[in-house]
Image (cartoon, helix red, strand yellow):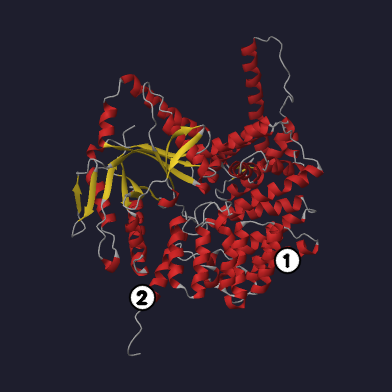
Amino acid sequence: MKYILMMNAKKSDFEAYARWSKQDLQANVAFMRSFTKELKDSGVFVASEGLSWPHEAKLVRAGSKGEPITDGVFPESKEFLAGYWIIDVEGPEQAYGIAARLSQGRGTEGRTGSMSVEVRQVLSGHSDLGL
Amino acid sequence: MKYILMMSGTKAGVSGYQAWPQSDRDTHMQTLRDLVKDLTETGEFVATQSLADSKEAKVVRGEKNGLPVTDGIFPESKEFLLGYWIVDVATPERAYVIAGRISAAPGPGGIPTNMPIEVRQFAAG
Amino acid sequence: MNSPASVIPFERSLRELAPQVLGVVARRFRDFSSAEDAVQEAMLAAFRQWPQEGIPENPRAWLIRVASRRMTDMVRSEIARRERETAMTTVEEPAIEAKEDVEADIEAVMDPEDSLVLLFMCCHPALSASSAIALTLRAVGGLTTAEIANAFLVPEATMAQRISRAKQSIKASNVGFRLPAPQERRERLPTVLRVLYLIFSEGYASSIGAQLQRLDLAREAIRLTRSAMVLLPEDVEIAGVLALMLLTDARRTARAGPDGELIPLDKQDRSQWDRAEIAEGTQLLTLALSKGAVGLYQLQAAIAAVHDEAARAQDTDWPQILALYELLRRVSPNPMVTLNQAVAAAMVHGPARGLELLQPLDNDDRLSSHYRLDAVRAHLFEMLGDFEKAVQHYRGAAAGTTSLPEQNYLIAQAARLEEARDKPTPIFP
């Protein structure tokens, strides 16, 4: 079963992250790398991506002639996707367990409290025989 | 450059979609299938996924006694991610045009939904 | 001497040969795990070289030779590594010194029993379902890692890792390359059958939609089960599984529309059902039942056979199906059986009876998701004429399913009923 694990953050969170100490930033990058590697080694990794920061984010709507109308203004409270992992696991418990490790383990000095990770199942193109 | 094009909605929005006449839903899906075909031909299509509904969704925040601490997340009014497209394009403008096509897909009565699509670039490297 | 290469057909023969080669090499070196890696490498070498150099006169001997060389290299470098690490000066003899013997390679035929060894090894109860499935498809099915990865929509590296870890588990459990004793075989057969049936289900479920370029897992499962049946002629349950697969697979073309829409059983164009598969499945089922096997798979196959023998949906022998579900519930009670039994009960005794049967499921924890319960309730409320409740449950089911084709189907049912409700009654007919 495929699940997506999403890290969301507000603009203010991104800005705060930019002010982390070099040590904490490096530790965070190292953690993300080893987390991904762990997923690969255990044969559950499907995909992962980091997204660039939200200052370039756009909202696009179709105009009257189907032309794109872009807008870059978002409310302060908006949560932006920062990155995601897609995993293929036996069931939801495994997915939540992996999300918990991601959420807990940033391993940076002085940073208590875990970041939240949203877990959603990815819809399959199969029918579902329920076996 | 890879971009992710994201569609969000609320519970009410999803119910609204489910209430469309079947033929309008069929047309909408056919339009999107045609778009996948076009983008595959241009080599810009990477992937598209739909996400399961909010019932099963969880937010996980850390571990307690070795177990994930979870929370169901979707209050009625909150927007959640319905699905996304990933495209590999030469310019951001091309990503916006593709997003525009998704947004222009017809809804009830053949009128474009004009759904807003959030466009984000993948981080480099 | 090589014959000119014909590119496509040799892939099929590689698939047949790979498990045979694995049987020989694993037996020769008494090491399943490393032999499996070595055979993989030999296969990759074949894929690279044969299109250019032509298919060898004796492809099996070629593969055995290449895989054996690889094994010898691996053994030698392992010894060298150990020597370096422990500064040993005496040389340890490897278990088998694989001196190259071309004659032996040509004559090497796998002991038929070793196919069974492979099958039981790969369907080891210590492995998770997905690991056993992946390993079985590669080692017993002869499929490449890329083909298996593609079938399950994961990256090749992930699938390779999954299989590698499965083999590590097997190695760690110290199971030698030998056939389990008859008693143990009997105990472990259900796991083998379950793995084979899961492969079939995965293939059948993904036969919806335009996935034609993907490996046909359902066909692979049928092929593997046929081989298992030849290897274990006394075990009638295998005939039951194969019967169930054939009787289900027979409907494959009819169950999906051109755009991948789901078409339920009662709406399928039965002229598209594969009559040959139905005939063979029925024959196998009769054979299994005549030998007294009335287990889980035989009962499910019997139910499928009753559906398949109805020329039209309205000709379906529902009382017989209901009786079979009652039997099935005694043999293997679980929520899925109850759900299906409720549908059959509704067809025989009316929807109210069906709805009654569903009530205990509300509190059944085994139902991992209640969307199926919603879907069946919706269907029964529709039969009852309570369109409002039916719509509510169809929508609930749509929200809970994780299958896109199913979701679309359920939404469409809800919409259909809403339109029926909203149609104004004409004042002037």
What residue lies at 43% left-to-right and 28% top-to-bottom? A105
B125 sits to left or right of C308 = left
Quadrant holding the C terminus of chain C: bottom left
User: Residue C264, percent across and down?
Assistant: 52, 67
Secondary structure, mark 2, is helix
Would you name the residue on which mark 1 appears? C283
Q: Report the residue at 47% width, 33% height from top.
A: B63
Dot 1 falls on which chain? Answer: C
**Amino acid residing under circle 2:** Asp
Q: Which mark is residue C422?
A: 2
Camera-side residue: B57 or C58?
B57
* Residue that appears at 57% across and 42% down: C144
Q: In this picture, is A30 found above or below C310?
A: above
User: What whole-number distance in Å separates the C-alpha atoms at marks 1 and 2?
Assistant: 49 Å
Residue C250 in view in this figure:
no
Q: Position of residue A2 (x, y in %)?
A: 48, 45
Q: Identify the image quadrant of residue C115.
A: top right
